[in-house]
Image (tube, rainbow, N blue to C red):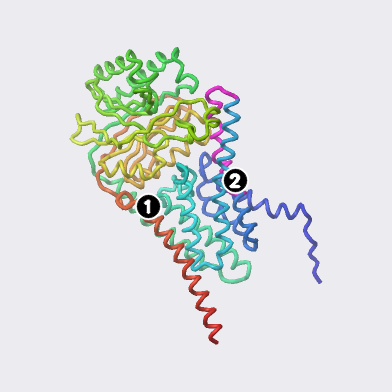
Amino acid sequence: MNNQQPKTSNQKLLAIWFPIIFSAGLLILSFPKTDWFLLAWVGFVPLLALCEDCTFKQCFWNFYWTGLFFFLGVFYWIGFSGFMVGEAWLGVLTFAGAALLCAYFAFYFGLFGMIYFYRRKLWMPVLVLPAAWVILEYGRAHFLSGFGWASLGYSQYKNLPLIQIADLTGVYGISFAVFFVNLCVWQAACLRRKNIKSLGWLIIAAGLLSFMAVYGVRQIKKFDQLQSSEVKVAIVQGNVPQDEKWNPEKWPAILDKYLKLTQTAIAMKPDLVVWPETSFPGLLWQDKKYFESLMSFSSLHKTSLLVGSVVGENDKYFNSAFLLSSRGAIAGRYDKIHLVPFGEYVPLRKQIPALASLIPMTDFTSGRELIVFDLGEKQKSARFAVLICFEDAIPEIVSKFVERGAQFLVVITNDAWFADTKAPFMHWQVSVLRAVENRRSVLRAANTGVSGFISPSGKMTGMVKNFSGKATYIEGAAMQPVLLVTDMTFYVRHGDVFVWGCLLLCGLGITLNFLTMNYSTGRKEYA
């Protein structure tokens, strides 16, 4: 006799939505500011359990809703950018845009749900499914200008031993491992429910993690003991409110603040002082009195300065970084290459005039050349590249700079657009993975934080903080010696071959399944 009572509609809804929200919550908590990165290794298990016996359509929507809740939980801060310029209507518009963006990102989760439905028809699904996940992450990071933040691999930025494989695979190798372990845990749970020994799947997961850990510890030790020349670099964080940056009345005070912070940094005797993105008040060539005072300051204190500025030339505007030598002369300039859609230019402005009218801004012009700076005064070779704003989120750009001889990397950014949210810390975790992939020291100078230093092994070695330990919405300066590294990693030399390997693996999985099915059908017909 069956004593089980039929489920009510509320119970059915709870059985569906609880795993979706639970998985999304676990993944959100694995990212900043909580940084409970271990949760990512099991974050998909409730969702995989829900989809075990679902239809094709249900798999799509279960993954889609999980993705939507996840992206809303980690990217909600995108909507703050409109309010930071003091326009309520623009704030409402940006929140609506952020919601649409998250809905678009969630589509990649949904696509994976469709693939997951066919898992039993795939050859070696425990390998093919993580490979498919990597391909979709890569697609999200590149399609329509791309936005690769919140890839699974970034959640592990504080898990130093397990992120060291990034110098071989990039961040996507870590994403593969995270999803692979989720699958193994779920497979073990399935077997356990059927009273079948499940230890094998857990041993497989433990084997992968052990390999990553052994490799990671070895690499950390190698770079901790690295004997290399150094250059002393100071960073300053001005914490200039967003509504003051473009107010001409505030420009003298802004410049005075940065000069005072720089004097504090100079007392530490650095070879280079770095200011954040667009920290120079006004337009570089149009406000000569500010620029002349800056050159005089550099010459007087015999200190090289790297300064972020908006440059106006021939009715074009560039988001730039320029290097002032210790003699007060311009030693180099880099114009940002990868511009932010809707932040620095309006896509399809000519094709959709109505869209451009909703966003009253002048488009920036992208730079055309990757410039590697060289201090060239106190060091025989002190070559570095500058990544402006979220250019450090584009692995290909960073690797190209390293190929051109950059011995360390400088990130200058604003990060004041998104209030005191997850955003600065999610930007920091991106820089950590770039340091490991390229085995270069990364130092970051932000207007509002996070400003600090990252070693070639991904260790945080210093940060601008106040007395209570707060890193954002404070002003200050910090200085550290920075290693000059010239070796090229496998990732720098060969790029995202791991992603192409994942694509090959997916193709192989589908092809072998197709051939196996045809072979089996042929044998039955012959018999």
- Say whether residue 321 is magenta: no
Q: Is residue 463 above or below residue 433?
A: above
Secondary element at tag 2: helix
Q: Nearer the N terminus, badge 1 or badge 2?
A: 2
User: Where does residue 329 sit, x and y in percent of width and height?
Assistant: 24, 22
Q: Which residue is mark 1?
A: 496
Q: Residue flagged by tag 2: what amino acid is it?
A: Leu
Q: Which residue is mark 2?
A: 68
Secondary element at tag 1: loop
- Tell me, yes or no, if residue 469 can be seen here: no
What are the residue bounds of the magenta stretch?
Answer: 65-88
> From this viewpoint, which residue is outermost toward the bottom?
527
Q: Is residue 140 above or below residue 208?
A: above
Q: Is residue 519 above or below residue 157?
A: below
| Mark 1 burial class by Cα count in 10 Å: few <14, some 14-19, many 20+ | many
* Front position in the image: 492 or 164: 492
Where's the N terminus, which quadrant? bottom right
Name the residue at 48% across, 28% down.
Answer: 416
Name the residue at 56% across, 26% down.
Answer: 83
Gap between marks 1 and 2 measured at Cα: 27 Å
| Disc 1 + disc 2, Cβ < 8 Å | no
62 lies left or right of 6: left
Q: Which secondary structure class fits the magenta region best? A: helix
| Mark 2 burial class by Cα count in 10 Å: few <14, some 14-19, many 20+ | many
User: Where does residue 34 sit, x and y in percent of width and height?
Assistant: 53, 41
User: Where does residue 159 sit, x and y in percent of width and height?
Assistant: 44, 48
Where's the C terminus, which quadrant? bottom right
Name the residue at 41% across, 14% down.
Answer: 253
